[in-house]
Image (cartoon, rainbow, N blue to C red):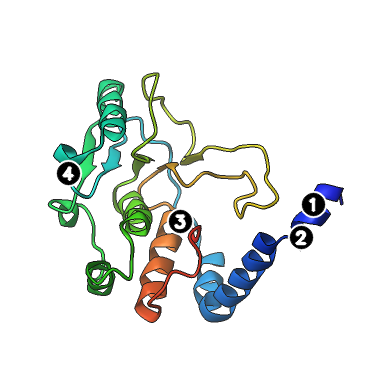
């Protein structure tokens, strides 16, 4: 174990991560166990995948930076259909349960976290690519050669993801097991809870 790894284990962030993990395993372990034994659907990468963007208030209310990123996404979509998810149209593409919508309306679920929930629900139901609103595309969208893609970075021991994925950009095929798992976990978590245990729950 390196010195940096040792020091990371002593950090408040790491202690909090362990506490969050312990709570989730204790209270939602049955969901995790169910999915451990669930076979992943066989799927090949879809060359004609949909692209999802989200700005709850709609395009007209986008800040300048977000609008520039959205226009770049449209310009470099390489023929893929780009759908902007908003408060006005999200129900056309998602099947979120009433308790999540109610807790969002009451402010228990923030719009930032709602985008996490929407992301996995959309990818489960439709597949495709989700880049967060401030991702700026500089090249045309690629063809993905596998059923799941995210951005890997240098491992950061203080970060839950450890560099293995980035929540701000996902590509998944329709019915992906990871998207189904997270969609299921979000549904059950917010059925039981009224507060987000950690900002980086995803």
Residue 5: numbered disc: 1
User: Mark 4 sits on what residue?
Assistant: 58
Looking at the image, residue 18 lies above or below residue 64: below
User: Mark 2 sits on what residue?
Assistant: 9
Density class for disc 2 (Cα within 10 Å; few <14, some 14-19, many ≥20) is some
Mark 3 or mark 4, which is nearer the start of the sequence? 4
* CB atoms of marks 2 and 1 within 8 Å: yes
Q: Is residue 17 left or right of residue 189?
A: right
**SS for dot 4:** loop
Mark 3 or mark 1, which is nearer the start of the sequence? 1
Mark 2 or mark 3, which is nearer the start of the sequence? 2
Q: Residue at x 47, y 55 (%)?
A: 178
User: Mark 3 sits on what residue?
Assistant: 177
Question: x and y percent of residue 116 in the render?
Answer: 38, 55
Q: Is residue 133 left or right of residue 177?
A: left
Q: Residue at x 12, y 52 (%)?
A: 88
Q: CA distance from mark 4 to mark 3?
A: 30 Å
* CB atoms of marks 3 and 2 within 8 Å: no
Question: x and y percent of residue 7 in the render?
Answer: 80, 55
Looking at the image, residue 69 lies above or below residue 165: above
């Amino acid at each position: 174990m390196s010195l940096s790894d040792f020091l990371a284990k002593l950090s408040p962030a790491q202690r909090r991560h362990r506490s969050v993990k312990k709570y989730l395993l204790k209270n939602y372990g049955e969901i995790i166990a169910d999915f451990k034994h669930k076979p992943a659907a066989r799927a090949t990468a879809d060359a004609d995948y949909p692209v999802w963007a989200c700005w709850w208030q709609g395009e007209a209310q986008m800040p300048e930076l977000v609008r520039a990123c959205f226009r770049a996404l449209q310009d470099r979509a390489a023929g893929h259909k780009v759908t902007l998810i908003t408060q006005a149209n999200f129900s056309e593409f998602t099947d979120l349960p009433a308790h999540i919508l109610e807790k969002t309306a009451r402010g228990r679920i923030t719009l930032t976290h709602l985008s996490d929930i929407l992301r996995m629900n959309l990818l489960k139901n439709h597949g495709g690519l989700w880049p967060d609103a401030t991702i700026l595309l500089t090249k045309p969208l690629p063809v993905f050669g596998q059923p799941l893609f995210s951005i890997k970075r240098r491992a950061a021991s203080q970060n839950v993801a450890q560099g293995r994925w980035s929540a701000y950009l996902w590509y998944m095929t329709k019915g992906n097991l990871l998207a189904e798992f997270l969609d299921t976990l979000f549904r059950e978590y917010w059925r039981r809870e009224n507060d987000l245990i950690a900002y980086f729950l995803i």
